[in-house]
Amino acid sequence: MAIDSSLFQIMYTASAAMLYPVVILLILAVTVSLGLIGEFISEYAKRHRNVKQLEQIGRNVKENVNKSSYDEAASHLLKLEQNQLVTSFANDAADHLKKNTLSSIEWLSEEYEVRMTKRLEQTKILSTVAPMLGLMGTLIPLGPALIGLAQGDILQLANNLMIAFATTVLGLFAGIVGYVLTLIRKRWYWQDMADIDYLVDSLETGQ
């Protein structure tokens, strides 16, 4: 029994010691989520997709690549004005065209796909980890709260319950922000990747 009692005491002490790191991580998660909201609004304001221009430039690039007029095809790509990632890909692809390295353009598109995935990982991690931290912040203070209840210490009970509720709210807030931003950005990047694939197909037709 003494061994069991000592083991439970160690477990309780270890879990109680995790409260402050959990609270600090939660505050950091909320701060990151607020920053991501600002970044999301800025990205939304800059998004611009012109389907007609994309189709026209795709046709022009295809025609010039078929004629091996790579400099002319590159000049059309440089005129593209779309969402930031698509425009950036077009500019990089134009550089490859000028160097007559068409074989590396497909690799370039895969690099952009990895870049999009990396940006989504930030909000995915936030949406998963923040609620877990909130749950930890809820459960850890319940031990001292129950001890306070058993001892009739209402102040200790109230303080620990306040911490438990606050950490729950913070974890859910950060998790919701991460989840919503992940869903919306995933749709954005699927569309961007579709546009990049269209440009890649236009470039590969003449090979």
Image: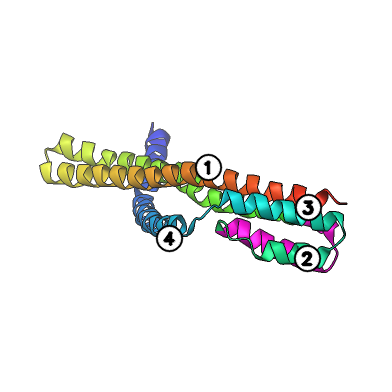
- Provide the secondary structure element on which disc 3 rests: helix
Using the image as rendered, state which of residue 138 and residue 76 is in the foreground.
76
Magenta region: 84-106
- Mark 4 to mark 3 CA distance (whole Å): 33 Å
Left/right of residue 166 with respect to residue 136 in the rendered view: left
Which residue is denoted by mark 4 in the rendering? 42
* Residue plotted at (63% across, 52% down): 54
How would you rate the neighbour count of disc 2 (Cα within 10 Å): few for under 14, some for 14-19, many for 20 or more? some
Question: Which residue in the structure is indicated by mark 3?
Answer: 62
Q: Is residue 113 visible?
A: no
Give the residue type that dot 1 points to.
Answer: Arg
> Which of disc 3 and disc 2 is earlier in sequence?
3
CB of mark 1 within 8 Å of CB of mark 4?
no
Q: Which residue is mark 2?
A: 72
Q: CA distance from mark 1 to mark 3?
A: 27 Å
Alpha carbon separation for disc pair 2 and 4 = 33 Å
| Magenta span contains residue 127 | no
Which percent across, then down, holds residue 141? 28, 43
Q: CA gap, disc 2 to disc 1?
A: 32 Å
Question: Which comes sooner in the sequence, label 1 or label 4?
Answer: 4
Q: Report the mark closest to the observer, 1 or 3.
A: 3
Kindly identify which numbered label has been placed on residue 187.
Answer: 1
CA separation in Å, label 1 and label 4:
17 Å
The secondary structure type at the circle numbered 2 is helix
